[in-house]
Amino acid sequence: MLQPDRATRAEWTKTVTAFVDEFIEGLEGAPASASGTALLPPPPAETPGELADLLAQFADAASQGVETAGPRYLAYFPAGGLYSSVLAEFLAQATNRYTGVAATAPALVAMEHSVIRWLCDEFGLPQGSGGIFTTGASLATLSAVHTARQDRLHTHDPNGTIYVTPHTHHCVAKAAHITGFAPERIRVVPTDAHLRMDVDAARALIDQDRAAGLRPFLIIGTAGATSTGIVDPLAEIGMLAHEESLWFHVDGAYGGAFQLTERGRAILHGIDRADSIAWDPHKSLFLPYGTGVLLVRDEAKLRAAHVADGDYLQDLDHGTGVPDYSDLGPELTREFRGLRIWLPLHLHGAKAFRDALDEKHDLADHLRAELAKIENIELLPSDLTVVVFRSADSEQLFKSINDSGRFFLSSTRLGGRFTLRICVLSHRTRREHVDEVIELIRRLSAAPAK
Ligand SMILES: *Cc1c(COP(=O)(O)O)cnc(C)c1O
């Protein structure tokens, strides 16, 4: 019963792909958001169900909430989800090979590792660098904080201190909490007028902490802050980290991928000084959720911080020449995550990704330029493909845009004040969508406040 025959497989696959085709074709016209419920469906029956019924139930559930795959989703970090990656996932899960250690699938692990190597080159990391695909930047950051602690403090020391800014993502605080650092060991460095880390202030804080008997060991630079897309002065932070013997981690969850473009490389200048870089192909490489990556300057340090062994693994050859990924992260068994990035890169070609990122960058610049022309709209500092702004009544404008069902935006707070935020990042978002949201903002911000 658990092994469907060929005819049944063909029938099921046909039913599911027909749904997927219709779903993708329908994205252009689908509402940006819809109301939804979280009612629990009944538990499984003892007897078999009908795929068509179950698919209908899934389709109904998927139609509720926010249309994150659609072209008019401009909130948080839209990625869309490449179809080529979906196919890779189908292949990876159908073959279900074990890539936690290399010996059980050496050539597949080599495919995954080839992407890691290519990324290390793109980021200008030296020989000996490496990394691992994770479920997202939060898990990559957890491994980075743990590795920094092992490498710089050697053992757990509650006096270790970590340097961030008010715009650092909360995944750093979470990682610090899990690795055993109290909230007061996270030191918040002030930012300059453009919301970038004030490196002189960081230096002063580090001096002050050392004098007080604390042990500074980790500094975080953000390449593309979540609220604004702003990039910290990475080269200067890297220099400071070097002088002070701190581990330099770059959180490029959103902005990291812009290293693939010429314009982006100039903005991310200095990222090659990082000891570790976390970023999210499920954001800016348009892949489905669940794909992050951690790159490290010295793979041996990542391994030293994570390696473990058990008698039951004694048959495995550890000399394949490619990493045993279970030595580089907290997981033993893992999905074959590499294929969902390897296949799209090879199928579309790397240039298609560079061009798409450049196109989104152009669209965000166009959006900034057009919003600046609208009376009552105040633009705030932003970078890459995030645009932040206020109006005479920002909360009302935000609500009206999302209530329109045409677009879905998110908001943030800057300087304690409510701020609207647009991120152009989905591979499905094109010029016509951006022009439409500009028109909508023009119209709604001109309406008298109620
Ligand atoms: C999204 C984001 C994260 C968290 O990444 P997940 O993949 O959601 O775990 C971390 N840092 C920044 C800057 C982000 O934008």
Image (cartoon, grey):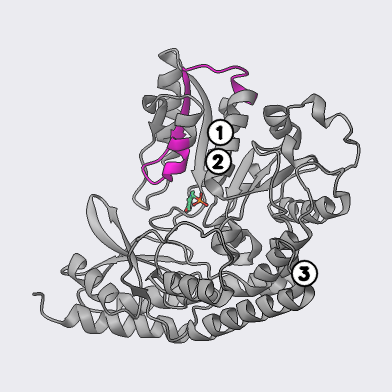
Amino acid type, mark 2: Thr
Left or right of residue 142: residue 159 = left
Compared to 16, does 247 lie above or below? above
Residue labelled with disc 1: 145
Q: Is residue 152 magenta?
A: yes
Residue 235 part of the magenta segment: no
How many neighbours does mark 3 have within 10 angstroms: few (below 14), some (14-19), or many (20 or more)?
A: few
| Picture residue at 44% right of the left edge, 22% below the top | 207
Rendered residue at 42%/48% (across/down): 196
Left or right placement of residue 410 versus residue 43 in this view: left
Could you tell me which quadrant the N terminus lies in?
bottom right
Sequence-first disc among 3 and 1: 1
* Mark carried by residue 141: 2
Q: CA distance from mark 3 to mark 1?
A: 32 Å
For this rendering, which residue is in front, 39 or 131?
A: 39
Residue pointed to by mark 3: 346
